[in-house]
Image: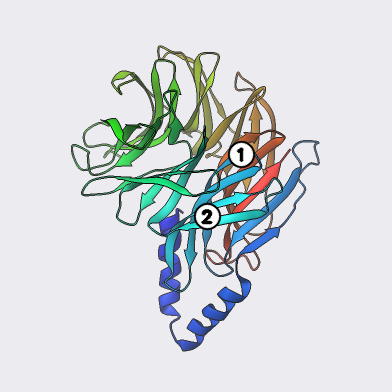
Amino acid sequence: MNAKDIKSLHNIIIMRRGGIYFALFIFFASYAMGSMDGSVVDKHSSLGLPEETWSRNFGSFLFPDMGHTIEECDDGYIAGGMTIRFPYLEQYGWLLKLDDRGRMKWSIILKNMEDLIDVEIVSDGIIAGGYGKDGDLKILRMDSEGNMIWEKSFGGEYLEILKKDGCITETKDGGYAVLSTTWSFSDDKGADMWLLKLDRDGNMEWEMVYGKREDADIGYGVMEVEDGYIIVGQSFSFNYTDSGIIIKVDENGNIIWEKRMGNSLYSVSSKDGCYVVTGNLWDEKESRYVFLMAEVEKNGSITWLKTYDDLPSEGGYSMDKADDGFIACGNGESSITVVKLDGDGNEIWKEKFDGIGWRRAECIKKVDDGFILVGGKTSFPWLFPYFLNLWVMKIQ
């Protein structure tokens, strides 16, 4: 369930519970509780694997909040996501600064945005992106304290959105590459992948659209390489089949090669001049999706492809390079699993984090002294979508 689904379900419930007493209850409860900054620590280190060092929830008591992206900065972390606020019950983008123990230092409500999907720490501040209330792609440039330097909108008649963390990257020339999904600039007005190259000031240098006619093509991640860019995503066909996509393009966005594997490719990283991707694959025998990881050569040849039956189907939803391999996270029905893999895709350890209630991980990153992830988690009394908060967890 994505942020818009949460908002829609929440609004339906509210409308059906109309009346002056419920309105007064919301008013007083919201302002009495304010912003939650709780620490709930569950130990999951019985095998000597990662120990959860802290876990914090952020958001209002009654209205759902969700985290999508997090980055380490000099004195803590920058996280982004969505929040719904009283009295208008509007959904907004949300940017948070946390200290090294996960305590909130400041937060900014972005009222012209529906959701903040990706935040990246760049050479002299923050670059962030999401989708606006007008349906356009929004890219924001801020200093390290969240002060706005510039804000740009890109879009057309229909909808443009970022899908997940990893869709923005700083380029070697000081600009930015942004991978969005567009409905406005598709040939058949379906969804296509839309790659934008921006300069340092957010001005568009070039743009390219990728996707097969009559298919829905979704972009999930972009990475700059020495001779261009690698993008990953997913293609949905009208015959109800789907496939993961990896495309290499040159410095001007022209396609060099394209490969398809699995049913989705969510994340991309690098390894000794090669590219490592994660996603999922439909297992006919098990009748479910399984976690997929593959290494791809510069010329597009697949070196190896591995699947993992004992990991969640979204086990590759977010992946980052670690000191001696890769770290990835995935989601079960109400739990998350963190897995460490070596450079050849062999499992080193995995750890499941669960408990009463519902939780979801949207992004995991390697940090100086462990790993940090962000997503959403329900709090007592664990009624979804009520009491869903933006959730940050630090593990070692």
Closer to the eye: label 2 or 1: 1
Judge left or right: residue 69 versus residue 239.
Answer: right
Residue picked out by circle 2: 66
Residue 157 can be seen, yes or no: yes
Query: Measured along the vertical axis of the image, is residue 346 above or below residue 136?
Result: above
Amino acid beneath label 2: Met
Q: Secondary structure at mark 2?
A: strand
Judge left or right: residue 223 versus residue 40.
Answer: left
Label 2 environment density (alpha carbons within 10 Å; few <14, some 14–19, many ≥20): many
Q: Position of residue 31 (x, y in %)?
A: 57, 75
> As rendered, which of 202 and 316 lies closer to the eye?
202
Colour option used: rainbow
Label 1 environment density (alpha carbons within 10 Å; few <14, some 14–19, many ≥20): many
| Residue depicted at 68% across the width and 53% down the height | 103
Assign the C terminus to one quadrant of the image.
Answer: top right
> As rendered, which of 211 and 290 lies closer to the eye?
211
